[in-house]
Amino acid sequence: MAKMWAGRTSGEVSSIADAFNASIGFDQRMYKEDIEGSIAHAKMLARQHIIEESEADILVEALISIRDDISEGKLSIDETAEDIHMFVEAELTRRVGDVGKKLHTARSRNDQVALDMRMYLKNETDEIIEKTKSLIAALCEKAESYKSAIMPGYTHLQRAQPIMFGHHLLAYAMMLLRDIDRLKDCKKRMNISPIGCCALAGTTYDTDREYEASLLGFDGIAMNSLDGVSDRDFVLELLFDISTEMTHLSRLSEEIILWSSWEFSFIELSDAFTTGSSIMPQKKNSDMAELVRGKTGRVYGDLMGMFTALKGLPLAYNKDMQEDKEGVFDACDTILMSLCVFAPMIESMKVKTENMKKAAQRGFINATDLADYLTKKGMPFRSSYKISGEIVAYCIEHGLVLETLPLSVYKSYSELFEEDLYEDIDLINCANRRNSKGGTSVGSIEEQIRYVKEQLK
Ligand code: ARG
């Protein structure tokens, strides 16, 4: 395609340089935003009497038809165009003649690309928020079903204290709620329009940037033209937010992988979300969770890539900034796909409550409660802690558990032990007595579910 910027130069650009320079391969996904931005620009130009009203009508109508033709597959994007902005403008001029050449008055590709990116990423952010909500809803529903399923809670991957499975799942719901909060906050800063900053210095035309921004649904305009075209903070922020959310998905993935192992056997994923082995007939692998965990690495790479591309750039636009796209598009695609598989994977997983309970019964996770029992009867906590430890050591040595250890043995450690100790170290009771706000008791879980549902509204 002929270069629209030819004039200063007359020599042909080498085909290798052309291919290296082009971004149309990856920025064509912003065609709708590019056209929407151009429609608003044409309207603003007419309103400010920079072009005729009738000219704006021609431009708007043609832009709409170009958008529809691309959407319906009637117009294919010419990959020899340098980028999507050039392609749309060239197609417009091909359709309406010279009036098409007026559209680029009082703007530059520098503010245009910054605008398109903000518009495109605003939509992506909304979609990530929606999909995250679906996952939270799935977690909430499982938590409701298993609000009294006892399992060991872990620290250092060692069995620590009894918790309910619902409580564990809700921990992830809370993380994801914060992820949504971060995304919404990021969107606030993204929702500032750079259009009208032009190449870098603003323009001599009597434009109305606020009007154009409001047509496009922005909350305000960039207040410094150099900053408007140079700022990619919103890309960094979104990449950070996606990276953080992927971290949460990755941690949950890791647990799903562990829980699905024979060693844990706490859950079984549905066949729809697992794969088999080509050689070992017995295998059922949690590939989806492993992929989410693996893809988290590349999303971090996208974030680091953007940071590194920006760190040495002088103001204002530099071609390095074309590198803002593939990374963030990849991060958006990755998290959206991850969320798409995650919600149904959680919904369809089978929870093996018996195995969780068995694991809870091994590992002396009620030892804290045994110590608390003695403390309640008047013994200083450090002393009760020591005695409980000794009783645990005795049980380990003799292959016994606290729940069935005879009272006579308990009494040999302390005369404070009575029959009611068995109530206190019952696992379900242990969990339900942790009814402090945010604790693992059924009552607290119900309160958490109400909180999460309220936040999702
Ligand atoms: N394709 C370019 C990008 O993605 C558009 C901006 C080009 N501006 C320029 N002065 N060459 O960043």
Image (cartoon, rainbow, N blue to C red):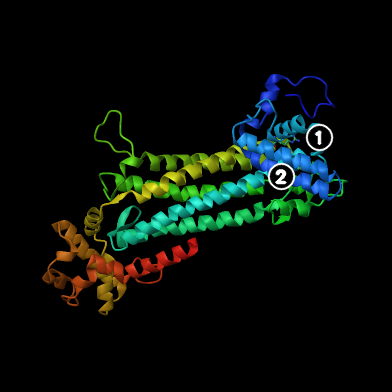
Q: Position of residue 252 (x, y in %)?
A: 40, 50
218 horizontally vs 380: left or right = right
Q: Amino acid at mark 2?
A: Gly
Disc 2 versus disc 1: distance between alpha carbons? Answer: 16 Å
Tell me the residue at 70%/29% (across/down).
Answer: 82
- Residue 71, horizontal then vertical, whole percent: 60, 37
Q: Quadrant of the N terminus?
A: top right
Q: Is residue 355 above or below residue 101?
A: below
SS state under label 1: helix
Q: Residue at x 25, y 55 (%)?
A: 353
**SS class, disc 2:** helix
Residue 420's tag is: none
- Residue 74 in sight: yes
The numbered dot on residue 101 is 1
Task: Tell me whether the residue at label 2 lies in contact with that at label 1, contact meaning CB atoms closer than 8 angstroms.
Answer: no
**Amino acid type at mark 1:** Lys
- Mark 1 nearby-residue class (10 Å; few <14, some 14–19, many ≥20): some
Where is residue 411? Give x, y as percent.
15, 73
Q: Which residue is mark 2?
A: 37
The correct choice, above or below, for 63 with respect to 243 in the image is above
Dot 2 beta carbon under 8 Å from ligand 1: no
Name the N-terminal-most of marks 2 and 1.
2
Q: Residue at x 45, y 63 (%)?
A: 453
Quarter of the rendering containing residue 424: bottom left
Between 181 and 92, the residue placed more toward the observer is 92
Quarter of image, ligand 1: top right
Q: Name the residue located 61 percent from the left edge and 54 percent from the top edge.
A: 186
Q: Position of residue 237 (x, y in %)?
A: 61, 50
Residue 28 is at least partly visible in this image: no
